């Protein structure tokens, strides 16, 4: 699937047409198009990959910045360009920034993955509920039509 298709899918995800139809037991119900859950899954995948890519970009930017700070601190210590205490503080800040960066990336990745898993489970449960209620209604209709024939 191409990126433009995923963007189009995410634009229309909220405007999926729902039609009123009469169920087997005579009640009105909303019917979702057959591809609704496929579209939802594709949009969910696109959002998930986008959030991970964003997290990775932020991680790489902060990682490169903290490594550059470490090299700068080491270089400044070698050329004795400042007081040793201030340069150690600068290097310590770079290490702290690196640790925060790695922690942020791990937490964001775990939370995005957990959110994706929960969304998939909810979507699967909704689909199972729809198919189960449809099976029950068909069974009722079949048994009532069978009883009417005899």
Image (tube, rainbow, N blue to C red):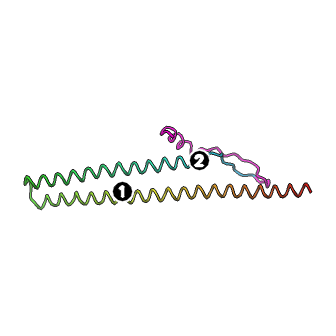
The image position of residue 84, as x and y in percent, is 10, 60
Quarter in which the C terminus is drawn: bottom right
- The segment highlighted magenta reads 1-27
Mark 2 burial class by Cα count in 10 Å: few <14, some 14-19, many 20+: few
CA gap between label 1 and label 2 equals 29 Å
Q: Secondary structure at mark 1?
A: helix
According to the image, label 1 marks what residue? 105
The image position of residue 19, as x and y in percent, is 69, 45
- The mark tally for this picture is 2
Residue depicted at 56% across the width and 42% down the height: 12
Mark 1 burial class by Cα count in 10 Å: few <14, some 14-19, many 20+: some
Looking at the rendered structure, which numbered label has been put on residue 115? none
Which of 19/92 is in front? 92
Residue depicted at 40% across the width and 57% down the height: 108
- In the rendered structure, the answer to whether residue 101 lies left or right of residue 11 reads left
Tags 1 and 2 in contact by the CB under 8 Å rule? no
Q: Secondary structure at mark 2?
A: helix
Q: Which of the two labelled residues, at mark 1 and mark 2, occupies the earlier sequence position?
A: 2
The image position of residue 111, as x and y in percent, is 44, 59
According to the image, label 2 marks what residue? 38
Residue depicted at 48% across the width and 46% down the height: 46
Magenta stretch holds residue 85 = no
């Amino acid at each position: 699937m191409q990126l433009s298709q995923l963007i189009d899918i995410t634009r229309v995800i909220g405007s999926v047409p729902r039609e009123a139809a009469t169920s087997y037991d005579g009640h009105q119900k909303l019917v979702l198009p057959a591809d609704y859950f496929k579209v939802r899954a594709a949009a969910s995948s696109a959002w998930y990959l986008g959030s991970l890519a964003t997290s990775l970009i932020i991680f790489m930017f902060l990682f490169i910045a903290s490594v550059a700070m470490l090299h700068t601190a080491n270089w400044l210590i070698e050329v004795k360009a400042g007081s040793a205490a201030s340069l150690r503080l600068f290097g310590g800040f770079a290490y702290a920034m690196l640790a925060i960066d790695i922690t942020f990336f791990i937490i964001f990745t775990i939370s995005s993955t957990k959110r994706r898993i929960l969304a998939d489970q909810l979507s699967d449960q909704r689909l199972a509920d729809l198919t189960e209620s449809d099976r029950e209604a068909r069974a009722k209709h079949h048994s009532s039509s069978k009883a009417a024939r005899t």
